Image (cartoon, rainbow, N blue to C red):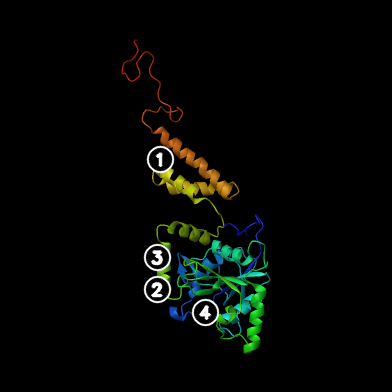
Amino acid sequence: MTAYEPPGAPGAAAPYDAVVLAGGAARRLGGADKPGVRVGGRPLLDRVLAACATATTTVVVAEPRTTVRPVRWAREEPPGGGPLAALDAGLRRTSAEDVVVLSADLPFLDEGTVGRLLDTLRGSDGPRGPGHPEGVLLSDPDGRDQPLVAAYHAGALRRELAALAAAHGGLTGLPLRRLTAALDLTRISDPVASFDCDTWDDIAAARARIREHGHVLDEWISAVKNELGIDLDVDTGVLLDLARDAAHSVARPAAPLTTFLVGYAAARAGGGPEAVAEAARKAGALALRWADEDTPGDTPGAEPGSHAPTPSGAEPGSDAAPDA
């Protein structure tokens, strides 16, 4: 996974924290465990955690469960006290100046979208510069705000949460719009990343989309890496080319076996994208040499692409043999 890097700061990712709200009642799912519902073989919560994997601290507001990576856990008081109470509980366990606030039901959120939210929040002259908004949130295809797919200045959130708690004797039961109405916000339209799963029809639509031709391979690779605990950003195009060459030049079963051996060789060489690329290069070259040996007119042992010499005394292309 490539770390998020803000513009103008190559190699130096600016810190941010993440708060993920995952403790809702999921009434429109019949009370199902929504964060644990799987889309593309991965729980919705794990998909969201992958999108904010570069956060310095990630706090999930819910009862603890097994997750794809370590997080901190928090719970609002009282449990079930609503989104503002949950946000306040999570925010108390963060320390960065900028915080990404997410719900746990966003199947198509990715790290690029999180980076875009942070870039817009910070602008071109660094965090908290002149004229910057206090928050940046996504809007859905109908133009509705999605305050749980957003990046905020943590200080602005703490200020308004404290004001609301003082005015209402606490945060329990207050809607999110009470908070967002008091903030200077910028909106970004993103119909895909803002898609959330409130109903079983939403879940079915998300599952169908990731199986479309343009998405299925990336989704599958992400799911496999998640399942195996691999955090390795490799060029899958190189591996696909290798599999194609092995299948075409040798035999179909050679494709999966060759890619397995490439992975094994890369691991023995120390791992990493460079080791995978080098092992794939060697195996790909071998597959092409293998195919060259089957080219009609080639001579075993000759260089690839060279042809058998014409017998001495014979015209090129004739069947005549030299006299004894």
Residue positioned 43% across, 67% down in the render = 206
Task: Point out the frontmost of discs 1 and 2.
Answer: 2
Above or below, comparing residue 187 to residue 6 in the picture: below
Tag shown at residue 249 = 1
Q: Label 1, label 2: how many angstroms apart (C-alpha)? A: 45 Å
Q: Return the x and y of residue 93 as percentages of the image width and height.
A: 66, 74
Q: Toward the viewer: 59 or 129?
A: 129
Left or right: residue 186 compared with residue 214: right
Residue positioned 64% across, 85% down in the render = 165
Dot 2, crowdedness within 10 Å: few (<14), some or many (≥20)? few
Q: Toward the viewer: 130 or 140?
A: 130
Report the amino acid beneath label 2: Asp
- In primary-sequence order, the first of circles 4 and 2 is 4
Check disc 3 and report its element: helix, strand or loop: helix
Q: Label 4, label 3: how many angstroms apart (C-alpha)? A: 25 Å
Task: Point out the frontmost of discs 1 and 4.
Answer: 4
Report the amino acid beneath label 3: Ala
Tag shown at residue 208 = 3
Tag 4 and tag 3, C-beta contact below 8 Å: no
Q: Toward the viewer: 39 or 148?
A: 148
**Quadrant hosting residue 244:** top left
- In primary-sequence order, the first of circles 1 and 4 is 4
Residue corresponding to mark 4: 24
- In primary-sequence order, the first of circles 3 and 2 is 2
Residue corresponding to mark 2: 201
Check disc 4 and report its element: helix, strand or loop: loop
Report the amino acid beneath label 4: Gly
Left or right: residue 241 compared with residue 22: left
Q: Label 3, label 1: how many angstroms apart (C-alpha)? A: 34 Å
